[in-house]
Image (spheres, helix red, strand yellow):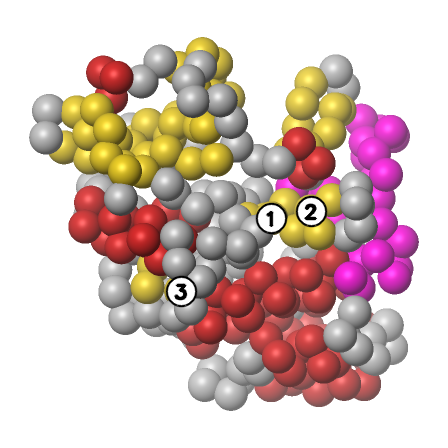
């Protein structure tokens, strides 16, 4: 595990501000980012260390921005190091760099997105399958995603439809607490879920991701698919059946079932 002192780091550019902290691009080493937590945010440094070690094992090839080191100041963990998002998961909109967040796939095209290349139906299916494969890989390594939102899941068409996940310090090992407690994102919570994220709540959120990508709808739920024939007509029968099970806590389909429904796209 890599532990570094905050005083030994030189940040060159502030990249983003979020609810948990501020992200900076480091001057050295190149390609690395610093997430500096807001003062007062509780950090379980041992759990962060476990997550870092997990990302260096069999899951190192999973397309996520795995934390790669802890940052300490005055004996307290105040941040983490992580790799920069690959360039193909970003674009330029209205003259500034923007990450290709999931939200671009879930709303009607807006005027400022005029130059953004959006996927066709077949490419959406492949992107949905790539998200399913991401969850499948993490779950096989006993990692629970927890917080899922339109901001922490990325996609691209460059080099073929692909996906990437950020804000991975909110992940946790199954049965263990997260290093940093994520806030549940409105519209992306399990309506029947426990307060703690589990594999079952992850499966519900994977159903949300899959259905929303396929239908281009930021708010559709498995329950909606069960109730509305207009939605069912837009999905393959196998996917409708999976949506019905996704609405049932404890019976939600694992990722491999969604891959089957998507035809291993």
Q: Picture coordinates of residue 264 (x, y %)?
A: 75, 74
Residue at position x 37%, y 47% in the image: 169
Earlier residue among tags 2 and 1: 2
Q: Picture coordinates of residue 189 (x, y %)?
A: 48, 62
Look at the numbered disc 2 and give the secondary structure of its residue: strand
Q: To which quarter of the image does residue 229 belong?
A: bottom right
Residue 46 is left or right of residue 101, and the answer is: left
Rendered-image quadrant of the C terminus: bottom right
Residue 46 is left or right of residue 30, and the answer is: left
Q: Nearer the viewer, residue 119 or 65?
A: 65
Label of residue 155 in the image: 2
Label of residue 143 in the image: 3
Q: To which quarter of the image does residue 71 belong?
A: top left
Circles 2 and 1 in contact, beta carbons < 8 Å: yes
Q: Is residue 245 above or below residue 48?
A: below
Q: Nearer the viewer, residue 150 or 55?
A: 55
Question: For mark 2, does the 10 Å Cα neighbourhood hold few (<14), some (14 to 19), or many (20 or more) residues?
Answer: many
Q: Picture coordinates of residue 133 (x, y %)?
A: 62, 66
Q: Which residues are magenta?
A: 101-126
Q: Is residue 107 above or below residue 30?
A: below
Look at the numbered disc 1 and give the secondary structure of its residue: strand
Earlier residue among tags 1 and 3: 3
Residue at position x 62%, y 79% in the image: 256
Residue lying at the far left of the rendered structure: 75
Asked whether 262 falls inside the magenta stretch, the response is no
Residue at position x 47%, y 54% in the image: 60
Distance from label 1 to label 3 (Cα)? Answer: 16 Å
Residue at position x 26%, y 17% in the image: 8
Q: Which residue is mark 1?
A: 164
């Amino acid at each position: 595990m890599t532990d570094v002192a905050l005083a030994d780091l030189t940040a060159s550019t502030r990249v983003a501000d979020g609810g948990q902290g501020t992200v900076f691009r480091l001057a050295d080493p190149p390609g690395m980012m610093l997430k500096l937590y807001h003062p007062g945010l509780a950090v379980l440094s041992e759990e962060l260390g476990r997550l870092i070690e997990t990302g260096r094992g069999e899951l190192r090839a999973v397309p996520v921005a795995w934390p790669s080191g802890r940052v300490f100041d005055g004996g307290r963990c105040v941040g983490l190091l992580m790799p920069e998002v690959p360039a193909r998961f970003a674009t330029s909109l209205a003259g500034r760099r923007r990450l290709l967040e999931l939200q671009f796939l879930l709303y009607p095209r807006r005027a400022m997105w005029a130059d953004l290349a959006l996927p066709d139906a077949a490419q959406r299916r492949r992107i949905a399958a790539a998200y399913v494969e991401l969850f499948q890989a993490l779950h096989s390594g006993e990692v629970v995603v927890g917080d899922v939102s339109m901001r922490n899941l990325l996609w691209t068409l460059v080099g073929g439809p692909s996906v990437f996940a950020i804000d991975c310090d909110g992940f946790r090992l199954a049965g263990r607490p997260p290093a940093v407690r994520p806030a549940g994102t409105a519209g992306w919570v399990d309506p029947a879920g426990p307060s703690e994220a589990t594999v079952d709540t992850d499966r519900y959120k994977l159903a949300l991701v899959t259905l929303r990508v396929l239908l281009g709808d930021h708010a559709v739920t498995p329950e909606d698919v069960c109730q509305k024939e207009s939605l069912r007509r837009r999905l393959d029968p196998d996917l409708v059946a999976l949506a019905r099970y996704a609405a049932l806590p404890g019976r939600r389909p694992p990722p491999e079932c969604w891959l089957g429904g998507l035809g291993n796209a």
